[in-house]
Amino acid sequence: MKHKSSAMLCLAVLLLSACASGSGGASSAVRPSPSAGTARAPTILREEGLESVIGKSASTLTRRFGAARIDLSEGDARKLQFISNACVLDVFLYPLQPRSQPVATHIEARQRVGGGNADRAQCIAEVERSARGG
């Protein structure tokens, strides 16, 4: 009889601990995914020297810089990567409103060798020169 009551006590403790760990702990929280119509508008990078790229469509950018080295899409977001001899330019495009065409909202630039940060505006100019054959 003593073993039965000990087993019942252990079972009760296990059940209570399982309930407690799932009640409000951050690791067990279930977050609903946003519906297609509730996407937030992206933050637009506002930096001097980037106005010629920010707000432009993918087709406008590929006409200016040539074919993208990398063209990735995930959901309604898109990333285009262009290169010059000196730098790598990543352009991130997002729709500003639901079901609208994605436009450039953010730019990252890095040195082609070593991967260190590069000046974004200077990299834009270098990629454009490379696209023209210069």
Image (cartoon, grey):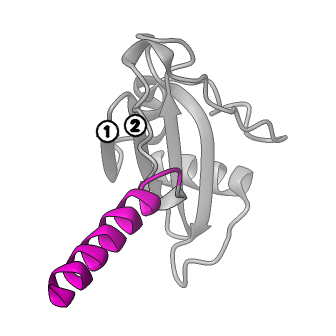
Q: Residue at x 49, y 54 (%)?
A: 130
Q: Is residue 19 magenta?
A: yes
| Main SS of residues in magenta | helix
Q: Residue at x 46, y 49 (%)?
A: 29
Residues at discs 2 and 1 in contact (Cβ within 8 Å): yes
96 lies left or right of 120:
left
**Residue 78 disc label:** 2
**The quadrant where residue 52 appears:** top right
Q: Earlier in the sequence, mark 2 or mark 1?
A: 1
122 lies left or right of 22:
right
- Residue 62 or residue 18, whichever sits in front: 18
**Residue 21 disc label:** none
- Residue 52 or residue 9, whichever sits in front: 9
The quadrant of the rendering that contains the N terminus is: bottom left
- Residue 50 or residue 29, whichever sits in front: 29
Mark 1 residue element:
strand
Is 131 rendered above or below residue 10?
Answer: above
38 lies left or right of 72:
right
10 Å crowding of disc 2: few (<14), some (14-19), many (20+)? some
**Residue 73 disc label:** 1
Measured as percent of width and height from the top left, residue 69 is found at: 33, 53
Q: Residue at x 54, y 12 (%)?
A: 97
Question: Where are the magenta residues, as a range?
Answer: 1-24
- Residue 57 or residue 17, whichever sits in front: 17
Mark 2 residue element:
strand
**The quadrant where residue 42 appears:** top right
Q: Residue at x 58, y 24 (%)?
A: 40
97 lies left or right of 37:
right
Measured as percent of width and height from the top left, residue 54 is found at: 65, 31
Q: Is residue 126 magenta?
A: no
